[in-house]
Amino acid sequence: MSRKIFIIIAIVLVIFIFALVAYYFLAVSNGNNPAGDMLGFKQFFPFGGTAPVSTTTPANNATSTQPIVPAQNYIQKLRKIWAEPVAGAGLLDVKAGTVVRHVEVATGHIYETELFSPVQNRISNTTMPLVYNAVWGNKNKSFIAQYLADDNETINTYVLSVKDTATSTQNPVSGYVLANDIEQTSVLGNTMFYLEQTSAGTQGFISGLDGLKRKQIWNSPLKELLPQLVSDTTVTLTTKPHQNVPGFMYSVSANTGAVKKILGNIGGLSALMSPDASKVLYSSQNFDSQMFLYSTKDRTSKNLTPATFPEKCVWSKKDANIVYCAVPREYLDGSSLDSWYMGMISFTDDIWKYDLKQNTSSIVGNLMNESGEAIDAIKPLLSDSEQYFVFINKRDGSLWSLDLSK
């Protein structure tokens, strides 16, 4: 390259950088950043994604920025709450109805949506980029946030709390950090359980979300485990599923640390225990994928149809014999769960209600017909009133709610 061409390229680069800096300060000075946010990569290089829209909430006349979602869709049976990828959501029933809070993946900003109205509000603009998992508790006031460190390997885990104030987007977020490489967490109310990876295996700790009363109740050479905090006194640990590999499910006493085997030697086991610990919904992955109901009292199993994965299910809070699940329309073979976990396949789900006492199942939400798009539901939640089934679409990370009363 000649010196003359090099000088020309250098001059062009300097002019380009100067233009970007000028654009940045012009945008700020013109008030295009009303919430006082630091402009991120997506805003500074405005391409791709969903265009934001400024909305005003009737509650406090404060403004917030959010992806375009038609306000009138709150009256529909199926509602798209958020169009951008969401790390996790929490539900809270108040006097007026159900409120959902969620964390946006790209920014870590926290939003609140009333499922009974068009009101949608940003309640914190604290920036926590690329939060990939958020598990809510403490009546939607606290959550566990996880994201990858700069090395793209270390998992950083924080317990964060939102202090409610009268001013939207100014709600401060405070918290504390947990140990690195906590891969799995589970939250119930004000209590959390998490697994710390060690060179010798895993250690399991239970504590309040405030970090107090921390107690170790698990120590094992097993590393690939999925926890479920069933109650204040019971935690289940299930080996991660893999086709044809024998899986096990254990119950651990939060008081004494005593361990009891619930299920074992089931190929590709995936399981979800009921809140009263009397039943386990589980699937096996061998030559095909099947779903079963196991009674912890009688130690008997029965087949359930249609088949799905326990990861797509949530137990009723009012009736121990009712469970709601997202069920794929596609046939599930023995490798489906593995392929789904690895992102090699996606499903098109409908929502089904299983009556375990009557041994019946019925569809309560045709997601494709209601939305006009394929939805692969994950992280299901059920409101205390059991009016709303809330979930994330694994295909694009968007957040949805299904009104079960319609």
Image (spheres, rainbow, N blue to C red):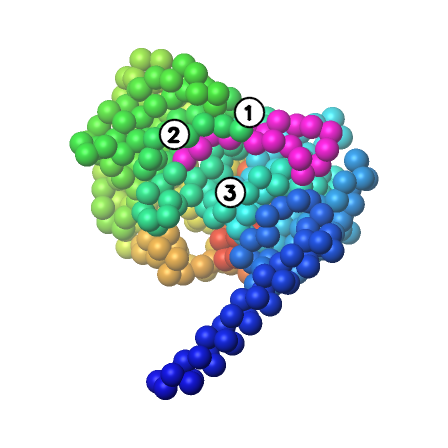
Residue wearing tag 2 = 178
Please say if 226 is above or below 233: below
- Badge 3 is on which residue? 128
Label 3 sits on a secondary structure element that is: loop
Q: Earlier in the sequence, mark 1 or mark 2?
A: 1
Relative image position of residue 385 (x, y in whole percent): 65, 30
| Residue 115 place in picture, x, y as percent | 70, 40
Nearer the observer, 127 or 93: 127
The span shown in magenta is 157-173
Classify residue 333 by image quadrant.
Answer: bottom left
The disc, 2 or 3, on the residue closer to the chain's N-terminal end is 3
| Residue at figure coordinates x 64%, y 32% from the top left | 171
Marks 2 and 3, how far apart at CA: 16 Å
Give the amino acid at mark 3. Met
From the image, tell me which residue sits under label 1.
138
- The Cα–Cα distance between marks 3 and 1, rounded to whole angstroms, is 20 Å
Secondary structure found at label 2: loop
Which quarter of the image is occupied by the C terminus? top right
Residue 28, numbered circle: none
Q: Is residue 385 left or right of residue 137?
A: right
